[in-house]
């Protein structure tokens, strides 16, 4: 389970008010979980937000974000512009079920696992990062067992169906999407790999 911190500590690290952190959580821009009357956020999400440069301009819609990702014209200095490429739903799911999703629902692998398969030297972990269509996500509970959990081991990146139709079929997400996934991590090693992937023409 990820290290969790109260909103007051997160606010101190980000240099904003507790109310601003609460607004980010409620808006879905920062993961958070409520335990009774207390809200907590994962420490790695705070670290990632501190690392990410400010957003330039409005976030792109899902379809436009994927058009830029597929064209290879992603500006990694402003990863927040591409946040609408998918809606992240964190869940707890067995490793076997997570590994089966590409075959079961046509999901594509993103994040650290995809980066490793693309040649980056990162350590594998128990987390999974998978892109899938909104239509597939809608029926997912009929195929595999999972429990929504803000600190879960699987990040399901649910892509709007119109944007999903742009993504070429395959097992691994496009390089630029994987680079963006890594830049959202709380691990500096992932940021370096993301910048390398995003700057790599291969």
Image (tube, rainbow, N blue to C red):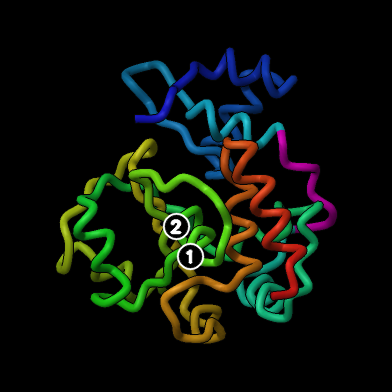
Q: Position of residue 138 (x, y in %)?
A: 30, 69
Q: Residue at x 20, y 50 (%)?
A: 94
| Above or below, 172 relative to 184 | below
Q: Are marks 1 and 2 in contact (CB under 8 Å)?
A: yes
Q: Outermost residue toward the right?
A: 56
Mark 2 highlights which residue? 113
Where residue 74 sits, quadrant-wise, is bottom right
Query: Residue 117: which disc?
Result: 1
Q: Position of residue 128 (x, y in %)?
A: 38, 53
In the picture provided, is 159 more to the left or to the right than 143?
Answer: right
- Label 1 – label 2 distance at C-alpha: 6 Å
Q: Residue at x 24, y 70 (%)?
A: 139
Q: Position of residue 14 (x, y in %)?
A: 70, 24
Q: Secondary structure at mark 1?
A: helix
The question of residue 57 being in magenta is answered with yes
Query: Which corner quadrant holds the N terminus?
Result: top left
Q: Which residues are magenta?
A: 51-58
Query: Residue 154: which disc?
Result: none
| Above or below, 17 relative to 100 | above
Q: How many circles with numbers are drawn on the protein?
A: 2
Query: Which is more toward the observer, 151 or 19?
Result: 151
In the picture provided, is 73 more to the left or to the right than 23?
Answer: right
| Above or below, 95 relative to 171 | above
Query: Which is more toward the observer, 125 or 168?
Result: 125
Q: Nearer the viewer, mark 1 or mark 2?
A: 1
Predominant secondary structure, magenta span: loop
In the picture provided, is 146 more to the left or to the right than 48?
Answer: left
Q: Secondary structure at mark 2?
A: helix
Q: Residue at x 66, y 36 (%)?
A: 49
Query: Which corner quadrant holds the C terminus?
Result: bottom right
């Amino acid at each position: 389970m990820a290290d969790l911190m109260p909103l007051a500590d997160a606010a101190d690290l980000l240099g904003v008010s507790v109310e601003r952190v609460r607004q980010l959580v409620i808006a879905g821009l920062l993961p958070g979980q409520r335990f009774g009357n207390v809200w907590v956020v994962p420490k790695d999400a705070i670290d990632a937000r501190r690392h990410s440069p400010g957003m330039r301009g409005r976030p792109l819609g899902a379809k436009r974000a994927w058009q830029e990702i597929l064209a290879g014209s992603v500006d990694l200095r402003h990863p927040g512009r591409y946040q609408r490429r998918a809606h992240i739903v964190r869940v707890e799911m067995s490793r076997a079920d997570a590994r089966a999703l590409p075959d079961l629902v046509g999901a594509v692998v993103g994040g650290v696992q995809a980066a490793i398969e693309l040649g980056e030297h990162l350590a594998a972990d128990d987390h999974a990062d998978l892109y899938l269509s909104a239509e597939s996500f809608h029926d997912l509970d009929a195929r595999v067992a999972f429990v929504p959990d803000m600190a879960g081991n699987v990040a399901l990146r649910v892509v709007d169906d119109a944007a999903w139709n742009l993504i070429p079929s395959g097992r691994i997400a496009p390089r630029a999407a994987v680079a963006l996934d890594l830049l959202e991590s709380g691990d500096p090693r992932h940021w370096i790999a993301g910048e390398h992937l995003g700057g790599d023409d291969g």
